[in-house]
Image (tube, coloured by chain):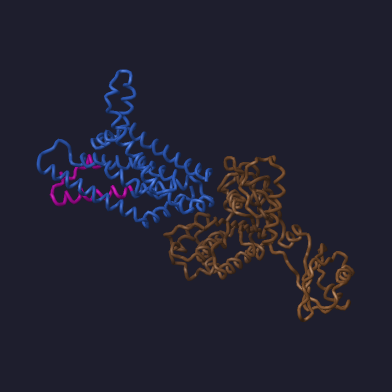
Chain colours: A blue, B brown
Amino acid sequence: MRHYFTILSHEIRALLYNPSTYIAAVLFLLVMGFVFTGILDAYSRSPQETAPAVVFFQLFWIPVLFMVPLLTMKSFAEERRLGTLETLLTTPVSTAEVVLGKFSAAYLFYVLLWGSTLGFHYILQVYARDLRYLDSGPLIGGYLFVAVSGLLFIAIGILASAVTRSQAVAGILSFTLLLGLIGGLSYVSELSALNQEFLSPLRTTLEGLRIPGHVDDFTHGIVDTRQVFFYLTGSILALLFSILGVEAKILNS
Amino acid sequence: MADIPDITIEVKDLVKTYGSLTAVNHLNFTVKRGEIVGLLGPNGAGKSTTMRILTGYLPATSGSVRICGQPVASHPEETKRHVGYMPENNPLPEDMRVSEYLWFRGRLKEMPRARLRARIDEVLELCDLKRNRHRILGRLSKGNKQRVGIAEAILAEPAVIIMDEPTIGLDPHQIIIVRNLIASLRGRMSVIISSHILPEIEETCDRVLIINGGRIVAQGSPADLRHEIFGHTTYRVELAGDTANLAADVAALDPSLQVSTLGDRGADGFLSATLMTGATDDLGEKLLLGLPARGYRVRSLGHIQPSLEDVFLAATRRSWDARLPDKKPAQGDNRAPLPKV
């Protein structure tokens, strides 16, 4: 792991030089800003049952679907296209170090961008001149959810980039995988076909994997270890497959 | 680097197949410390594949490769420390500056910071890149990029340097610079370069391996190769006098000498003759002294060297011919397509 920090700092530099990082950042803040003002608008017109922060985090999937592909699609695809992956892997670094370095850099940016949305809540509190608007409980839970689920989302983006040489294919692939993971799983878990008695274990499992359900739990202060375990093992699995993907691609090059 | 053995690269029975295609077919060779070896072969001969296996980037199908005594397959990290590699087309990240790139590569190659700082200055000086050290790699000219690649390969002072076509796409000035740069490594590092540009190899390499269809078809110094492939030396002499007895006269000088062609006599009475010999010694002096003694007036005497190009064509053609009869070689029938010669 002695090369991990060398690769990490190189990757952070690469992300800072990369226009798609800024596109992702601007788009993210724009979308989240609109979402936030939209929520405030709705709350100012009529009283609601849930806290604004809860609604804010329920819409996490909008930025995830475009931000994660933009942040990760370049990581391996571009290096493979340029051929620099070959020079990188002929130095005494292991594939695992390279994958982890790229993953960490993208994850850092992901968390940093989400962290910048803290500013929305701060501005609201400053303008409202009322500390009650800074609803700390759902905020802590929500950001915790973002940090934990981000591991899996970014790992999936890295995996998509590790299996192709085209950035566009990597981007579309990670978008599709994320859509399947977030939208597909929660759609399947609500199918009426699963209501039969003998399918109930499957139904329980799928309901446990519903990511929008996880958001509700986290923002209501429930940190379920099963969910944390799901994200951790999922991201480790995706990273392992990324390592295998990079090495398998070399064998067939 | 005291712990570097005399033989830095040892390749034994190396085989690499891609599906049904055999790219490298039972390759054997060794490279000594400080030697510059040229890998020569037509496209698809297995040069790049061999080099990639040497660097540990590609795994071999069978056989063994040892770098500085360590097997590449089981000790990849140790052997990679001894290798500086410049791949074909010299891929570089486009958005970094020259000095940043060298710093990053040096850190990956586990060079301590203080030594790396000094070493970067050194290689920039060596590769004549001082003026370009703050320029962005994507905006450099092809020649400068190539020099960055070489600087990167020699950065960590590895025992073995592997360069895949280092002079491809360069202009003659840049080729000379790169050639001198490679020649300056002689004696300190083992260098393997591949190229199609034959004069390149001829001028810089101590030894040439000609590869075709994944096998070595000829090896040795350029001079040895000429002799091995052609087996004779040719002299061209311009002389005047009665040439009726020329054949007998030259045979009297050295029994191995033969007149192969005799040109037309010019207006001034001189004609040019081509003499052939299978002897390995230089017969130039004998001819210069012996021909005038037998009444010929000699105007010029030249040694016709078959170029490495002829050697290359002959060697690759020879392997093609040699393999025509055995439709089914022992190790796999499929191999890289052979070139038209």
Residue closer to the observer: B54 or B252: B252
User: Which residue occupies 45% across, 57% down?
Assistant: B93
Residue closer to the observer: A118 or B140: B140
Asked whether A117 falls inside the magenta stretch, the response is: yes
Asked whether B169 falls inside the magenta stretch, the response is: no
- Relative to residue A214, is residue A81 drawn left or right? right
Residue B27, above or below B157? above
User: Which residue occupies 20% across, 45% down?
Assistant: A35
Q: Quadrant of residue B6?
A: bottom right
Residue B46, above or below B143? above
- Relative to residue B309, is residue B89 drawn left or right? left
Q: Residue A202 at x, y = what percent? A: 34, 24
User: Which residue occupies 82% across, 69% down?
Assistant: B283
Q: Quadrant of residue B270?
A: bottom right
Q: Look at the image and tell me whether residue B78 can be seen.
A: no
Q: Residue B111 at x, y = what percent? A: 53, 57
Residue A4, above or below B258? above
Question: Where is the C terminus of chain B found, in terms of image quarters?
Answer: bottom right
Q: Look at the image and tell me whether residue A36 can be seen.
A: yes
The residue segment tinted magenta is A110-139
Residue closer to the observer: A130 or B279: B279
Residue closer to the observer: A7 or B332: B332
Q: Residue B56 at x, y = what percent? A: 57, 48
Residue positioned most to the left: A45
- Considering the whole magenta stretch, tell me its main secondary structure: helix
How many numbered discs, if any? 0
- Relative to residue B68, is residue A89 drawn left or right? left
Q: Residue A234 at x, y = what percent? A: 39, 36
